[in-house]
Amino acid sequence: MNLENTKAQMRKGVLEFCILSILSEEEAYVSDIINKMKEAKLIVVEGTLYPLLNRLKNDGVLEYRWEESKSGPPRKYYKITPLGKAMLDELMVSWNELIASVNSIITI
């Protein structure tokens, strides 16, 4: 059994939830999202994040806008849509149910 692979799969399973939670507070540039994830000790790289953001945008749960940058190319800022907020609300319920279920099984 590869413990690191199992831990990575657990982290991947909550990425969408975390991204939607971050963007529910304010719109953000990709590096802002990465920094917030890093602060929470959820390391994610751009190569993982960009395809996920693109898929969430295509699903209608995120949208973005371009903003000119004084120190380089324009930046893409992402924000959650009303559909994304509804999805986040459902994920929050599911997350709380999952925590309760797992905590009823494991011994801490």
Image (spheres, rainbow, N blue to C red):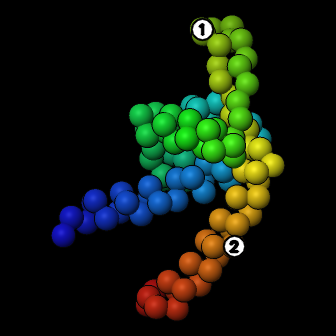
Residue extending furthest front? 59
Q: Residue furthest left?
A: 1
Task: Give the residue type that dot 2 points to.
Answer: Val
Look at the image and tell me whether residue 34 can be seen.
no
Q: How many marks?
A: 2
- The residue that mark 1 highlights is 72
Query: Can the viewer see residue 32?
Result: yes
Residue at (61, 48) in percent of width and height: 19
Label 1 and label 2: CA atoms lie apart by 41 Å
- Seen in the image, is 89 located left or right of residue 107? right
Q: Amino acid at mark 1?
A: Gly
- At 43% across and 40% down in the image, what residue appears? 48
- Secondary structure of the residue carrying tag 1 is strand
Q: Nearer the viewer, residue 45 or 57?
A: 57
Q: Which mark is residue 93?
A: 2
x and y, in percent, of residue 56 in the image: 60, 43
Q: Earlier in the sequence, mark 1 or mark 2?
A: 1
Q: Position of residue 38 (x, y in %)?
A: 51, 45
- Give the percent coordinates (x, y) of residue 7: 35, 63
The label shown at residue 14 is none
Tell me whether the residue at label 1 lies in contact with that at label 2, contact meaning CB atoms closer than 8 angstroms. no
Residue at the spot 77% in from the left edge and 44% down from the top edge: 81
- Left or right: where does residue 8 sit relative to residue 57? left
Q: Position of residue 16 (x, y in %)?
A: 57, 52
Q: Is residue 75 above or below residue 18?
A: above
Q: Secondary structure at mark 2?
A: helix
Q: Residue furthest right?
A: 82
Q: In the picture, which quadrant includes the N terminus?
A: bottom left
Where's the C terminus, which quadrant? bottom left
Q: Quadrant of residue 89?
A: bottom right
Q: Quadrant of residue 100?
A: bottom right
Kindly indicate the quadrant of the structure image that contains residue 3.
bottom left
